[in-house]
Amino acid sequence: MKRGRKIVALAHCILNSNAKVAGIAQTPGAIPVIVEGLLRDGVGIVQLPCPEQTYGGCRRWGMTREQYDVPNYRKHCRTLLEDVVDQMEDYLRNDYEVLGIVGVDGSPSCGVDRTCVGYPGGEIASMQLLPECSIVEGRGVFLECLMSMLHDRGVSIPAVGIDEALQEALSWDELLKKLCRCGEGVGTP
Ligand code: SF4
């Protein structure tokens, strides 16, 4: 069968919830509605690396954007993303259609429109009550690095975020519509 020449890049945990911070996965593995839609439409999938699991491992604590927004984590993100950005640029220069990037809103790393802020840091054991984190408008550190690296290459690809808390409302068709709306003028110069 002929290749479809359409590709989407998904945040790692959309295909593998095992990478998430312990206790917050909403699915046993991949998110079915997204995978089913991609299979139906014949869209190829690039799975982005999980920056947090590769940085802090499976036993990491949930952290906020401020805690991840440090030079060494940004360096880690940029290292992971070098090959991804190479791939995206090459696909676009060879007439493939990169429909976009799908991140995870609310994540301090992979949020597209919303991220998580709050904890100032400190000794957890000495805290009477853990400070609350909150979801605010803004981009996660990993997504920010990705978009900036693409921009530096002159590559423009749209990004949208899923809200995992609203699993029932998730639909690949809706995501695709959002990507198309954000994606006018995508490509390379
Ligand atoms: S860092 Fe990104 S890929 Fe990893 S678990 Fe969080 S949202 Fe998913």
Image (cartoon, rainbow, N blue to C red):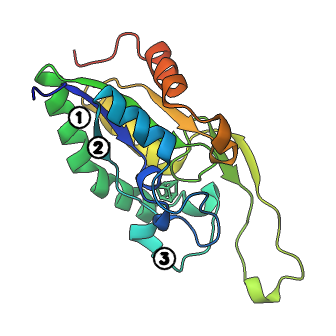
Q: Compared to 148, does 96 lie above or below?
A: above
In the rendered image, the quadrant that contains the C terminus is top left
The residue tagged with tag 3: helix, strand or loop?
A: loop
Separation of disc 2 and disc 3 at Cα? Answer: 22 Å
> Which numbered tag is attached to residue 46?
2
88 w.r.t. 92: above or below: below
Q: Please name which of the two marks, 3 or 1, marks the residue nearer to the observer.
A: 3
Q: Position of residue 133 (x, y in %)?
A: 77, 58
Q: CA distance from mark 2 to mark 1?
A: 9 Å
Q: Nearer the viewer, mark 2 or mark 1?
A: 2
Q: Residues within 10 Å of mark 3 (few under 14, many from 20)?
A: some
Q: In which quadrant is the N terminus drawn?
A: top left
Q: Residue furthest top?
A: 184
Disc 3 marks which residue? 58
Q: Is residue 170 left or right of residue 181?
A: right
Under mark 2, the amino acid is Val
Tag 1 residue: 88
Outermost right residue: 128
- Seen in the image, is 99 located left or right of residue 24? left
* SS label for mark 1: helix
Task: Tell which circle, 2 or 1, labels the residue nearer the N-terminal end.
Answer: 2
Q: Position of residue 63 (x, y in %)?
A: 63, 65
- Nearest to N terminus: mark 2 or mark 3: 2
Q: Is residue 73 above or below residue 94?
A: below
- Discs 2, 1 touching: Cβ within 8 Å: yes
Is residue 144 at least partly visible in the picture?
A: no
Foreground of the two, 51 or 165: 165
* Element under disc 2: strand
Q: Earlier in the sequence, mark 3 or mark 1?
A: 3
Q: Which mark is residue 154?
A: none
Task: Using a 10 Å C-alpha cutoff, classify the residue at mark 2 as few (fewer than 14 neighbours), some (14 to 19) or many (20 or more).
Answer: some
The amino acid on which the numbered mark 3 sits, given as a three-letter code, is Cys
